[in-house]
Amino acid sequence: MPALERWFCWRRRFESGAAAGLYRGVFLGVVLLLAGPAALLQGGESGQEAQWFKGTTHSHSLWSDGDEFPDMVVDWFKSRGYQFFCLTDHNVLMQGDRWVRLARQRRPIPESVLEAYLARFGDDWVEIRGEGAKREVRLKTFEEIRSRMDEPGKFLLIQGEEITDRTSGRPVRHVHLNGLNLAKFVRPRGGATAVRCIRDNVLAVEQQAKEVGRPMVVHVNHPNYGPFSVSARDLAEVPEARFVEMCNCYSNVHHWGDQDHPGVERMWDIANTLRLIEKKVPPLYGVASDDSHSYHDAPATRPLPGRGWIGVRAARLEADALMEAMIRGDFYASTGVELAAVDYDPAKGTLHVEVAPKPETRYTIEFVGTPADAQWTDDKALATLAGVGKVLASHSGTSATYRFSGKELYVRAVIRSDREMERPIPNGVQTETAWTQPVGWETRVLKNEER
């Protein structure tokens, strides 16, 4: 039975009331087998040499509220060395016949944008109809763009959607999630609370993955957007959610939080601490993204491309292989730092990280985690508790190894450089940084389930 089918099989048994107690431990074991960080020891799929692929999972075009034609957006990333790319416009897939008016009232398209589009792709590709103020351009579909831009082993376009939702309860919370490797449009499910919105939309993507028989990934976007629409507690309350944007490179997503709300990276640690201690479910994996909307002359406060991305380790540059690697946690998030190795060895109890260094750049590798005996009384106390997301060790240089003591809930690495990002983010990350996924939690979850 294929791994994906096994996953859904055990999921059904887990969720059925009568069998929940019997199958819960087995379900988590299958989750750990498919998504557990032990896969990092082999560096990907057994028997095949894996490599790192650079890509981004959150970008927009004229299909929703971006300011550029979708094929021009894809070309921007491909021409700059990205190996996979997901266009994730709001509540739409790039399917069907869609024409956009150049002189539209809201966000008109400058003549210079059309001229650049024609210069790049030519009259035989760009379709224009009408005259004067009524001129329209047809937006290319996902299949059309993929047929022109994909190159086996070099570049891959993956279909996605930003499922843009909001709560029906008060106050209104904005809940956005990105579905990756989709086959069909996902309608926002709604819900009275952020927890309900997250859970129902994740389950909708899971159901589609089951129906079409291919792996899909859903990540919760910019949780501090709204502002502060999704809390760490919300993220902890949805075990079905497995990914979160812990670095969204838009300046208005409150990356650093405020006096009453933790920053997003710290929120990641809080949610994972709650998930492991209270819920006894696997932690969230962290994604960095551009959330790019603006591809022309725009201030740094706008969501520009080329800021946030992920490096995924897989045996093949194929959508299913990349999704499976992400589900295993075999990827890292970055704003510019490239990693040569991330190797977790559960038998030896070590996490080893190596940087692919840039000239005249200094690196600090921090190992961050939460002690297993961390205590708190409420969410606000947890947000300021020193033991959550604590720096356990720090090394200067391009490689470092952390040895587990057995007292950690999990450990992840943060690689900080002194090199400024090419496009620094106002109110966000300023220097090139990378984050690995939490590891060392899998046996502790199993032990908790066995008690």
Image: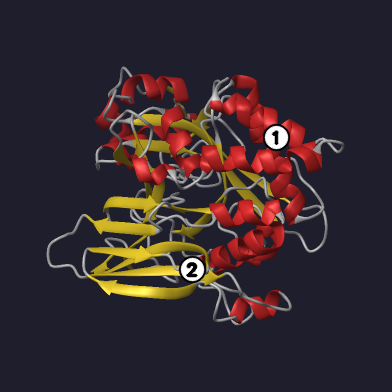
For the point 45% across and 71% down, the residue is: 427
Residue 8 x, y percent position in the rendering: 66, 29
Residue closest to the far left = 359
Residue 254 x, y percent position in the rendering: 54, 68
Q: Which residue is mark 1?
A: 11
Distance from disc 2 to disc 1, alpha carbons, whole Å, reads 29 Å
Q: Earlier in the sequence, mark 2 or mark 1?
A: 1
**Crowd tier of the residue under label 2, counting other residues whose Cα lies within 10 Å: few below 14, some 14–19, many 20 or above:** many
- The three-letter amino acid code for the residue at tag 1 is Arg
For the point 64% across and 66% down, the residue is: 228
Q: Which residue is mark 2?
A: 369
Q: Secondary structure at mark 2?
A: strand
Rendered view: 264 above or below 288:
below
Quarter assignment of residue 149:
top left
Q: Is residue 308 visible?
A: no
Residue 441 x, y percent position in the rendering: 54, 57
Q: Is residue 281 visible?
A: yes
For the point 36% across and 23% down, the residue is: 126
Q: Quadrant of the N terminus?
A: top right
- The three-letter amino acid code for the residue at tag 2 is Gly
Residue 248 x, y percent position in the rendering: 47, 58
Q: Secondary structure at mark 1?
A: helix
Rendered view: 250 above or below 343:
below
The label shown at residue 42 is none
